[in-house]
Amino acid sequence: MKDASPAARFWAEFRESRTAVIALAVVVLMIGIALLAPLVAPQDPYDLANLSLSDARRPPGFVGEGGYTHWLGTDAQGRDLLSAILYGLRISLQMGLVAGAFAFVLGVSLGIGAAYAGGRREAFIMRVIDLQLAFPAILLALVLSASLGQGKMQLIVALAAAQYAYFARTAHGAASAERGKDYVEAVLSTPLPGWRVVLRHIFPNCLPPLIVVATVQVANAIALEATLSFLGVGLPVTEPSLGMLIANGFQYMLSGRYWISIYPGIALIVLIVAINLVGDRIRDQVNPRLKR
């Protein structure tokens, strides 16, 4: 393995954990299913012409008017729940990844920029970030989402604004450590512009901890989006995620129609746990102190 590439060595070490490999397979499978939802879903759950209210709230295994079996049952609108979960999974993943990407770019830019600038600018930026970290992310996301209104872009802004501080704090710590090293001081003595020093020398060496934070924050963004949609301040009804599917069936829990909320909830839990397990394994690999 000495002559192997860094990626090959990383994968060889990663697959030593069977749990992490299974979790990664689950994540890849769920992403693949979400991308192919229109092709693999038994029904288009949002095509009103194909829905029948006589099929509403039917238990798992029910054969509907369309002639096919609803393996996970139907919801209050007569939608095939398996199809609704596949489409909802697609939206949840989309929101988590896009919001995580926005939070990554904003947080890393502020964190590394503050470490590079130093002085009062660094102190001001980091105090603002520390102030935001004092508040729970769910509270900030709830306030912003309620203020901005419903919609994909509004929710992405709310999620990114609630999470960028975690990236900023991590990036600042890593960049501050790199900023004081001899190779950076040597580069700063050359006429290279500051942005080039940051992008080519400081940022690449800050990536390992940022990748770990990104993995965790994508899972947190999915959970935050599901919470906001469950509370009714997330996505609109026309674009239901897993959180909204859970909310739609919550009122029927005590009447015995558990499947309307339980199955979307299971899908959400499996996705979040799998992403977190992958993130934990990556964290163990990039931090030698955590290796066993």
Image (cartoon, grey):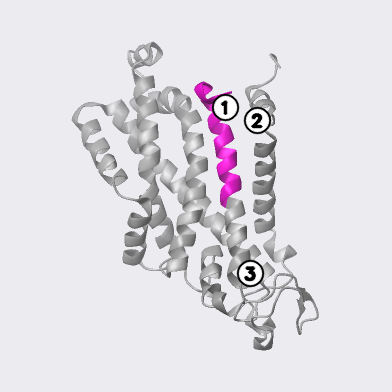
User: Is residue 195 in view?
Assistant: no
Lower sequence index among marks 2 and 1 = 2
Which numbered disc, 1 or 3, marks the residue closer to the eye? 1
Q: Is residue 152 above or below residue 236?
A: above
* Amino acid on which the number 2 mark rests in the picture: Phe
Q: Secondary structure at mark 1?
A: helix
Name the residue beneath numbered marker 2: 14
Residue 122 point in image, percent of width and height: 25, 31
User: 166 or 185, which is in the foreground?
Assistant: 166
User: 219 or 18, which is in the foreground?
Assistant: 18
Identified at 52% across, 25% down, the residue is 290
What is the C-alpha distance between the residues marked 2 and 1? 8 Å
Give the dominant element type of the magenta stretch: helix, strand or loop: helix
Residue 258 point in image, percent of width and height: 61, 72
Identified at 47% across, 45% down, the residue is 217
Name the residue beneath numbered marker 1: 285
Picture quadrant where residue 17 is located: top right
Q: Is residue 216 above or below residue 79?
A: above
Q: Residue furthest left?
A: 120
Q: Residue furthest bottom?
A: 54
Count the marks: how many? 3
Lower sequence index among marks 2 and 3 = 2
Could you tell me if the residues under marks 2 and 1 are in contact, i.e. CB atoms within 8 Å?
yes
Could you tell me if the residues under marks 2 and 3 are in contact, i.e. CB atoms within 8 Å?
no
Label 1 neighbourhood size at 10 Å, few (<14), some (14-19), many (20+)?
some
Label 3 neighbourhood size at 10 Å, few (<14), some (14-19), many (20+)?
many
Name the residue beneath numbered marker 3: 84
* Amino acid on which the number 3 mark rests in the picture: Ala
* Amino acid on which the number 1 mark rests in the picture: Gln
- Residue 88 is left or right of residue 175, and the answer is right
Segment colored magenta: 272-292
What is the C-alpha distance between the residues marked 1 and 3? 37 Å
